[in-house]
Image (cartoon, rainbow, N blue to C red):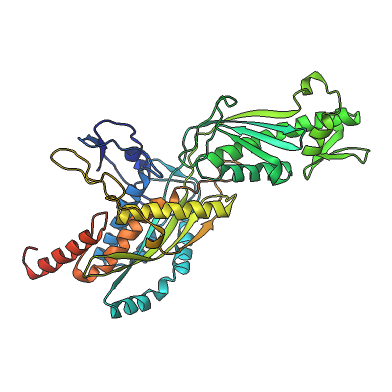
C-alpha cells in the first residue's frame, strides 16, 4: 500500500502515480499488487520534482531485498544476481503491465561494484573502526520511467548566412539543450557545431511544444530531427538541381554533400543555402531549405542503473559522513557525456539530501511549517559530499531512432535507498534493521540509543 500526503489540495498525482508501474523494480517478480491512496492533510501540497514517485518505490523494493537477504541468510548481492532481469528477456513486461525496453542490469551492477572497490570495503571498515567510527556500505538498483508530454514540433531552416536555425518547443533550465540539440543537428546534416542556432520555448514562433520535464526533451528533439532529415535532403536536392540546371533525380546526397551526376559541383547544406540566395528559385522553393516536423510519442523508456555508497558514522554524535559514492547509469545513447555526468552528479546530491537532511517539519496541531528558511532546512553542499565516480552505460532503446532513454533523473532515483542501506549496514552490530529518513545526526543517535536500551530491556 502506498499512502501519499498530497497536502491541503491536489496539485499533481505524479508523486503518487509515477512509481506504480515500477513496484517490482529490476527483478523477476511474477506477481505484484499495489494499492495507492492520496490523503489530504492540513499541510502544503506536493508536486513533481525530479523523478517523482520513483525514488519512493525504489526505496521500498531495495530495502525489501536487503531485508529478505538477511532473513534468508543469503548475501544481498547473490540474491540480486539470482533475480535481476536478463538482457535476453527484453523487452520485458513486468508484473503490473509495464514493458521495459532494454537493459543490462546484472552487467551494470557488477561494473558498479568494480568502480566502487566493493572488495576493498572490509579493509576500510577496519581502518574506520580504529578511529572509533562505523563504516557501512549500501547498494541499490533502480529502474525509472520517462515519457512526459507526447507532442513536440521542430522547425529547421538552413539560412543563407551559413547557419541552421532550429526552433523547438522545449525550454531548458540548465539541461544543456543548446549544446546537445546542436550536436544532433550537426551530426545529421554534417555541418559545424557552431553553425547551429537553437531557438527554444518562444511561443511567438512555436505552436506546439511539450516543455522540459520527465527526461523527454532530447529524446523528442532527436526523433524530430531524424524525422526531418529525409525532407531536408529532398528539398536540398531540388535546390541543387535548380542551381546546376538539372533534375532532383540527378542529385546525390552522401556524407553531408549534394553532388550532381556528371559534374564536379558539390555543396554541403550551408553552401547550398548560400548559393541558393543568389539564384531565382521556383515558387515552391522560395522559403529555402526549411522543414516543420511534428511528432507524437507514447512509448516510455526505462533508464536504469546501480548505485553504491559508503557512509562513516560517529556513534557518539550520530553524525553521518558520505565517504564514497559510485554509480553506473544506463541512459541509452549518450549524446554529450559531460552534460550527462553533470546531471547525474546533481541528481545524486538531491537524492542524498533527501536521505540525510531534508525534512519539512510541520506543527502537528496547527499545521504551521517549522522550517521557514534554509537556515532550518538541511540541503546538501559541496563540502558534505565526496567526489562521485559515475559511468555511463549505453544500452540503446528500440523506441526511438537514436536509442535515447534519459539521463537527468536516475541519480536521484537510487540515492535515498542506497544511502539508507549503507547507514543500516553501519549500525548492524547495534541490532538496527531500519531507520527513517532523513537520517539526521539526532535520528541516528536516537536510533543507536533505542537499540542499546532494547538490548538491555529498558526504555530509552
**Residue 166, picture quadrant:** top right
* Image quarter of the N terminus: top left
Q: Position of residue 453 (x, y in %)?
A: 10, 67
**Residue 81 visible here:** no
| On screen, residue 36 above or below 454 | above
Tell which residue pokes out farthest to the bottom in this image: 130
**Residue 83, picture quadrant:** bottom left
Q: Nearer the viewer, residue 172 or 434?
A: 172
Q: Nearer the viewer, residue 235 or 174?
A: 174
| On screen, residue 73 above or below 89 | below
Q: Is residue 182 left or right of residue 288?
A: left
Q: Position of residue 429 (x, y in %)?
A: 22, 71
* Image quarter of the C terminus: bottom left
Q: Residue at x 26, y 36 (%)?
A: 44
Q: Position of residue 174 (x, y in %)?
A: 51, 44
Q: Is residue 89 left or right of residue 453?
A: right
Q: Position of residue 173 (x, y in %)?
A: 50, 41
Q: Is residue 17 left or right of residue 3?
A: right
| On screen, residue 220 above or below 92 | above
Q: Nearer the viewer, residue 169 or 107?
A: 169
Amino acid at each position: 500500500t502506498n499512502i501519499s500526503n498530497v497536502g491541503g489540495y491536489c496539485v499533481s498525482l505524479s508523486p503518487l502515480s509515477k512509481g506504480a508501474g515500477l513496484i517490482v523494480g529490476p527483478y523477476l517478480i511474477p506477481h505484484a499488487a499495489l494499492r495507492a491512496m492520496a490523503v489530504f492533510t492540513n499541510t502544503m501540497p506536493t508536486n513533481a520534482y525530479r523523478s517523482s514517485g520513483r525514488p519512493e518505490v525504489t526505496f521500498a523494493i531495495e530495502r525489501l531485498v536487503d531485508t529478505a537477504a538477511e532473513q534468508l541468510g543469503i548475501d544481498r548481492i547473490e540474491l540480486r544476481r539470482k533475480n535481476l532481469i536478463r538482457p535476453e528477456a527484453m523487452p520485458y513486461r513486468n508484473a503490473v503491465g509495464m514493458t521495459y525496453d532494454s537493459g543490462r542490469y546484472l552487467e551494470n551492477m557488477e561494473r558498479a561494484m568494480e568502480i566502487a572497490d566493493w572488495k576493498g570495503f572490509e579493509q576500510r571498515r577496519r581502518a574506520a573502526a580504529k578511529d572509533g567510527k562505523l563504516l557501512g556500505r549500501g547498494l541499490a538498483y533502480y529502474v525509472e520511467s520517462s515519457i512526459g508530454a507526447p507532442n513536440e514540433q521542430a522547425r529547421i531552416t538552413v539560412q543563407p548566412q551559413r547557419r541552421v536555425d532550429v526552433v523547438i518547443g522545449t525550454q531548458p533550465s540548465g539541461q544543456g539543450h543548446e549544446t546537445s540539440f546542436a550536436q544532433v543537428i550537426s551530426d545529421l546534416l554534417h555541418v559545424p557545431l557552431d553553425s547551429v542556432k537553437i531557438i527554444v520555448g518562444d511561443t511567438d514562433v512555436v505552436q506546439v511544444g511539450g516543455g522540459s520535464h520527465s527526461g523527454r526533451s532530447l529524446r523528442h528533439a532527436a526523433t524530430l530531427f531524424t524525422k526531418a532529415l529525409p525532407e531536408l535532403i529532398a528539398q536540398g536536392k531540388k535546390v541543387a538541381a535548380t542551381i546546376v540546371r538539372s533534375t532532383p533525380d540527378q542529385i546525390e546526397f552522401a556524407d553531408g554533400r549534394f553532388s550532381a551526376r556528371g559534374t564536379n559541383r558539390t555543396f554541403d547544406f550551408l553552401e547550398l543555402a548560400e548559393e541558393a540566395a543568389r539564384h531565382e528559385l521556383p515558387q515552391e522553393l522560395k522559403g529555402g531549405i526549411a522543414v516543420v516536423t511534428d511528432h507524437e510519442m507514447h512509448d516510455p523508456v526505462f533508464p536504469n542503473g546501480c548505485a553504491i555508497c559508503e557512509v562513516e558514522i560517529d556513534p557518539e554524535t550520530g553524525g553521518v559522513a558520505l565517504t564514497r559514492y559510485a554509480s553506473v547509469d544506463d541512459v541509452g545513447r549518450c549524446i554529450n557525456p559531460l552534460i550527462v555526468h553533470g546531471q547525474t552528479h546533481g541528481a545524486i546530491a538531491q537524492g542524498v539530501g533527501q536521505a540525510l537532511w531534508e525534512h519539512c517539519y510541520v506543527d502537528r496541531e496547527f499545521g504551521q511549517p517549522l522550517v521557514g528558511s534554509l537556515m532550518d532546512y538541511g540541503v546538501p553542499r559541496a563540502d558534505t559530499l565526496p567526489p562521485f565516480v559515475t559511468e555511463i552505460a549505453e544500452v540503446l532503446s528500440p523506441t526511438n531512432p537514436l536509442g535515447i532513454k534519459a539521463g537527468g533523473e536516475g541519480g536521484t532515483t537510487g540515492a535515498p535507498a542506497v544511502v539508507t542501506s549503507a547507514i543500516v549496514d553501519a549500525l548492524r552490530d547495534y541490532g538496527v534493521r531500519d531507520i527513517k529518513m532523513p537520517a539526521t545526526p539526532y535520528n541516528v543517535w536516537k536510533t543507536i540509543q533505542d537499540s542499546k536500551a532494547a538490548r538491555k530491556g529498558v526504555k530509552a
